[in-house]
Image (cartoon, helix red, strand yellow):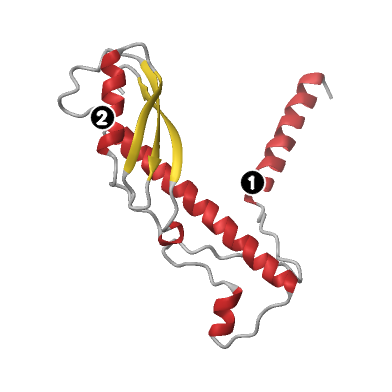
């Protein structure tokens, strides 16, 4: 066999193996004792605490199960917070080219603002942290943050909390 034939044979075998691996079912079966966590899409449902379980007439789980339940509740709250803050960022991004800001299409810059999200979802204490160097962009970004105030409603699991966040509004040519 020549080196060219050997190379072609290796490539052919490699293609066959790759196609077989691509079509292979890569689903692993859960092992005995594994727990699966179902996270509801609706974050308005508060997690059930152990005190609520006894009020419902259910038995309180042992301490290890209770710790797992508390950890799951914390994970759910973190996920809800992350989703909420992503929506806040998107609301600001959607409002960065408001009418009355002038022509921003040829300008480039990053503006960083900090603000406080109150319990009623409104923004207060909106402050410029880092300027883009262009007052027009700085003002437009500040107006975008102010316009997004109260637009995004938080999930029920986050009610009663307030947040201090920083956001960078990016302006690029025609974007």
Inspect this view and state whether residue 36 appears. Answer: no
x, y percent for residue 168: 42, 27
Q: Which mark is residue 142?
A: none
The quadrant of the rendering that contains the N terminus is top right
Mark 1 surroundings: few (<14), some (14-19) or many (≥20) residues within 10 A: few
x, y percent for residue 42: 42, 63
| Local SS, label 2 | helix
Residue at figure coordinates x 41%, y 61% from the top left: 156
Mark 2 surroundings: few (<14), some (14-19) or many (≥20) residues within 10 A: some
Q: Which residue is mark 2?
A: 143
Residue at figure coordinates x 70%, y 60% from the top left: 28
Q: Is residue 56 left or right of residue 169?
A: right
Front one among 77 and 146: 146
- The residue at the far front in this view is 125
**Relative height, residue 151 to residue 54 (above, below):** above
x, y percent for residue 117: 38, 44
In primary-sequence order, the first of circles 1 and 2 is: 1
| Local SS, label 1 | helix
Q: For marks 1 and 2, give the CA distance.
A: 50 Å
- The residue at the far bottom in this view is 57
- Quadrant in the picture for residue 109: top left
- Quadrant in the picture for residue 98: top left
Q: Which residue is mark 1?
A: 22
Front one among 16 and 4: 16
x, y percent for residue 79: 52, 52
Q: Is residue 29 left or right of residue 85?
A: right
- The residue at the far right in this view is 1
Front one among 6 and 121: 121
């Amino acid at each position: 066999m020549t080196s060219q034939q050997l190379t072609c044979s290796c490539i052919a075998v490699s293609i066959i193996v790759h196609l077989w691996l691509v079509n292979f079912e890569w689903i692993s079966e859960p092992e005995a004792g594994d727990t699966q966590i179902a996270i509801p899409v609706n974050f308005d449902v508060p997690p059930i605490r152990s005190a609520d379980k006894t009020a419902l007439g259910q038995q309180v789980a042992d301490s290890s199960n209770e710790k797992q339940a508390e950890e799951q509740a914390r994970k759910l709250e973190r996920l809800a917070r992350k989703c909420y803050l992503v929506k806040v960022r998107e609301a600001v991004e959607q409002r960065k080219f408001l009418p009355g800001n002038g022509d921003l299409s040829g300008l480039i810059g990053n503006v960083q603002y900090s603000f406080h999200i109150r319990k009623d979802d409104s923004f207060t204490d909106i402050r410029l942290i880092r300027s883009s160097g262009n007052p027009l962009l700085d003002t437009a970004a500040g107006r975008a943050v102010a316009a997004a105030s109260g637009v995004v409603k938080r999930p029920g699991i986050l009610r009663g909390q307030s947040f201090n966040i920083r956001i960078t509004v990016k302006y690029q040519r025609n974007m």
